[in-house]
Amino acid sequence: MWAHLNLYLDPEDPACSDPLRRVMAHLGDYAAVIVEPLKARPTDATLVRATNQRIEVRLTTVTHHLLLVIAPEADLAHEVFFLRSLAACDLPAPRLIAYDLSCANVPFTYAIETYPGSLTLDRINDAALVRIAGRQTGRMLRRVHRIEAPGYGAPTPTGRWSARTWREALAGWLEQRSFDDRAEVVLGADITSALRAATLDHPTLACTQPRVLHGAVEPARIVVTVGESVQLEGLVQPAPPVGGDPLFDLAYALASRQSAAFRRGVMEGYEMAGTLTAEQHTRIDRLRLLIDVAQALEEDDPAVLAGLPAAVMARLEALGEGIVNRATVSQ
């Protein structure tokens, strides 16, 4: 029942990394090795996702589904940490059945989790339902953010944390996206320097007590069920950083590419347990600016990039950081 998972990807396809090709060529063989010790007796295995960062295989048994998650290029230490943290507090998320971060039996890290369902919030077009789900997400995030994390950034497979400070964790998040090189090409050196001074290097973004984060709060990573209304089933696919300033999660959820209904719902839900201070809202604005720019540079839409320098200037001025001469934008 595993052989159909062995897939040979086009070696000339630039979208497929070598690690992805190597894993996919023997995916069925690897899955058999991983699943056999569980005695789960699956009756079917279905490939759900195959990207350079993540492979997912749904395992069907007589009574339920499980999800085999594989990281072809990096590791799943951050996901294991996040899911264990939420399980300890009985918060809605997939539960870990088994995992291996040592690469002892197969040449990659993997986890087997309960199957969260297939309906994600990004597939719902009803703004009222999206707002309700956003509100539930905000309430849940507030509970997640009460959990202290032992470090900043993400744990390594050996248990060490990737950053010593929150600034270092943020810098690592940007480095993974080749932020500096891309920003200087699009924004120019002066605006990029001002942007960093207002965000990454700004003293108000310091965080002395890291908390558990999801790291990528967006509708595509929120599993729901829909009946007469909508019900949050859990947050899935966490991403580094999973330890740091809780306001990073909020800023990510409030990013400009998210719908107004989702953004409004998340803030409503988060503030049900207490209104955020003006200083916290300003920190969110600074983090959101950084995230918005990073996402715009990643998405590489020419129309968006053309207006990005002026947009960044305007937002810097709104933060009281209008230190770049407007003439720079037109150079």
Image: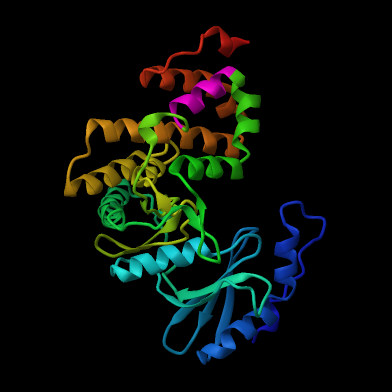
Residue 320 visible from this viewpoint: yes
Q: Which quadrant is the C terminus positioned in? A: top right
Tally the numbered discs.
0
Residue 247 in which image quadrant: top left
Q: Is residue 113 above or below residue 180?
A: below
Residue 319 in which image quadrant: top left
Q: Nearer the viewer, residue 111 or 208?
A: 208
Main SS, magenta region, reads helix
Q: Position of residue 49 (x, y in %)?
A: 58, 65
Residue for point 49% across, 61% down: 78
Q: In the shown orientation, is residue 107 left or right of residue 176?
A: right
Residue 33 in which image quadrant: bottom right
Q: Is residue 231 above or below residue 36?
A: above
Q: Position of residue 318 (x, y in %)?
A: 36, 19
Q: Is residue 100 above or below residue 75?
A: below
Magenta span contains residue 277:
no
Q: Position of residue 26 (x, y in %)?
A: 73, 76
Magenta span contains residue 192:
yes
- What's the magenta region? 190-199
Residue for point 63% across, 39% down: 178
Residue for point 61% across, 58% down: 53
Q: In the shown orientation, is residue 114 left or right of residue 128?
A: right
Q: Which quadrant is the N terminus positioned in? A: bottom right
Colouring method of the image:
rainbow
Residue 93 visible from this viewpoint: no
Q: Position of residue 274 (x, y in %)?
A: 17, 45
